[in-house]
Image: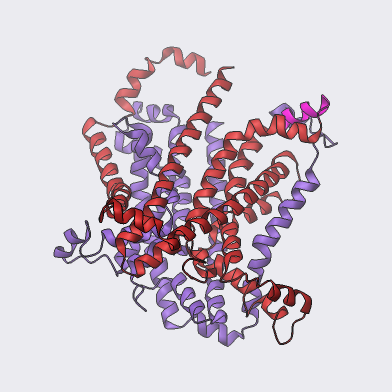
Amino acid sequence: MTPVATTFRPPPQVVHHHTTSEPPAVRRALIAVALVFLSLFLFLPLVFVFVQAFAKGVGFYLETLRDPNAWSAIKLTLLAAGISVPLNCVFGVCAAWAIAKFDFRGKNVLLTLIDLPFSISPVIAGLIYVLVFGAQGWLGLYLNADNPKFPWLANWLNEHDIKIIFAVPGIVLATIFVTVPFVARELIPLMQAQGRSEEEAARVLGASGWQTFWRVTVPNIKWGLIYGVILCNARAMGEFGAVSVVSGHIRGQTNTIPLHIEALYDDYNYTGAFAVASLLAFLALITLGLKTWVEHKNAMLNESEISK
Amino acid sequence: MATNRTKARKIRVLPGFKLTLGFTLFYLGLIVLIPLGAVFWKASTLTWPQFWHTVTMPTAMASYRLTFGASFCAALVNVVFGLIVAWVLVRYEFFGKKIVDALVDLPFALPTAVAGITLAALYSDHGWVGQLLSPLGIKVANSQLGIFIALTFIGLPFIVRTVQPILEDLDPELEEAASSLGASRWQVFWRVILPMLTPALLTGFALAFARALGEYGSVIFIAGNIPMKTQITPVIIMGELDMFDYGKATAIAVVMLVVSFVLLLGINILQWWTNRYNTHNLA
């Protein structure tokens, strides 16, 4: 039906110009509205961070970053991201493999559960770990100094001076929680769209499960995986609310970069706060750059596949 | 694809189902579900009058009104401007479009604490924007208007990114048909394009609204956190935690969690509707 109709239609370009676009004045006005809105809400804050960071000169900037407390915050942030990103990466690949390559009941429920950390306030994400590990919490009841239910565990934790809440392990756990969905959420739709025929072919031709995974699946999901890792890392390094609840706010010990920024800001050291914030703003720019680059790569990959 | 599905295999050729699903459930249980259960466990140790008294105390009630109101207004403003931004990015060409497109995701990538201190400083009485507004009698820092601005910043990408792909896939033939039948450009937009974008706009609105309800880092610096005036609900929870009153913090957290779960359910239904609408259009 359609081929006949198309022969009677005027060339599509002409139609497109006259009837499916707006007059130039409207067009220009809409572009102006969009750009003014974005400038006010996005570009201005971004520029402002860097201008404020260097308000007292490069010397003060470097001094702020070389401060031992800033340095310890940077190390703690790298540690939290260094643990949570690989863990959530493994989780994401496992979840995507199970969901995309097999049929089972309750898949939609599982998908919703994976997304759950995104719909929970960061403050509540921190709170739940306080309720599990804190003195008044679940584990607190069992490890109560006066009447421990598991004396050996309480002794062991005390002997090794291991604290979870208001200490580094709590910060790592809260960071893991808020970044759980990132990799899984990128990989699941991607692997579902790719189907399972390529892996099945590899298996039928005699490849082992691991060979199939490394030689067939990983090259196929490479860009999606990188994309997920970039976003996961950005959130892991920038998380504030959840980490703020479980951190002891001890400078030089349990402050991550965002918490150090808050501490400097609360001291009225605005230039210092913005100097440290510029690190994270720079990370955000790198994240956006990498993200755009991966999207570009992916689009080219799709195009070459279609042309094949 | 279709043939693949019809000859669905009875025997699983691919290995690792039990291992990967097992690990997925174990990890989710350990990191997400069991800790979440602690909230409901803690809440169950409260008596009903205790719980009710906490969740209805005046500061909490004021915070619900503020959080819901500001989140709703911010999401609404983003629907209008997000649609314009998405429209401009999909339909028009202009200088720097690629950079603008990439920067739309800035609120996702910029840590909330950085956004928070930046907006607070920009809109303070001596800030770049604040000093222009204060002679007009508009006070943004330490006011509800400031909270609205922070939430607008946070929510923008949700609308743009849900509307953009739908707008890209829109069939131009429908618009051509409408205009060849005599519809004006405005009628085509209002009667043809907008109805097709409605599910995506609603989904984007719901996502931005849900995110705004729980937002903490970008709001607290500009809000000033004045009790009964500019305290959002997460700040109330934080305040109870600082006083080590975990029972009260938990009770308010339960209210927020229930709202989040209802919203999550609504968003899933909306997304299902969006997808169905799309596949229907494509077919």
Instruction: Say if B243 sits above or below B88 in the image.
Output: below
**Residue B87: quarter of image:** top left
Q: Where is residue A36 in the image (x, y as percent from the top left)?
A: 25, 45
How many numbered badges does the structure rendering display?
Answer: 0
Specify whether residue A32 is in view: yes
The quarter of the picture where the C terminus of chain A appears is: top right
Q: In this view, does A127 lie to the left or right of B114?
A: right
| B131 in the magenta segment | no
At x 37%, y 15%, the residue is: A11
Secondary structure mostly seen in the magenta stretch: helix
- For the residue pair A9 and B230, the one nearer the viewer reads as B230
Residue projecting furthest to the top: A7
The colouring scheme, among rainbow, by chain, secondary structure or one colour, is by chain
Percent of width and height locating residue A1? 53, 18
Q: Residue furthest left?
A: B135
Magenta stretch: includes residue A199: yes
Residue at the outermost right position: B11
Q: Relative to B146, does residue A180 appear above or below in the rendering? A: above
Residue B255 is left or right of residue A24, and the answer is right
Q: Which residue is drawn at 73% across and 77% down?
A: A154
Residue A121 versus residue B277 in the image, above or below: below
Left or right, B147 with respect to B240, comes to: left
Q: Chain A is drawn in which colour?
A: red
Res. B75 in view: no
- For the residue pair B218 and B74, the one nearer the viewer reads as B218
x and y percentages locating residue A19 in the rendered image: 32, 27
Q: What is chain B's hue in the picture?
A: purple
Decide: is B89 above or below A77: above
Quarter where residue A288 is shown: top left
- Relative image position of residue A193 (x, y in whole percent): 63, 34
The residue segment tinted magenta is A196-207
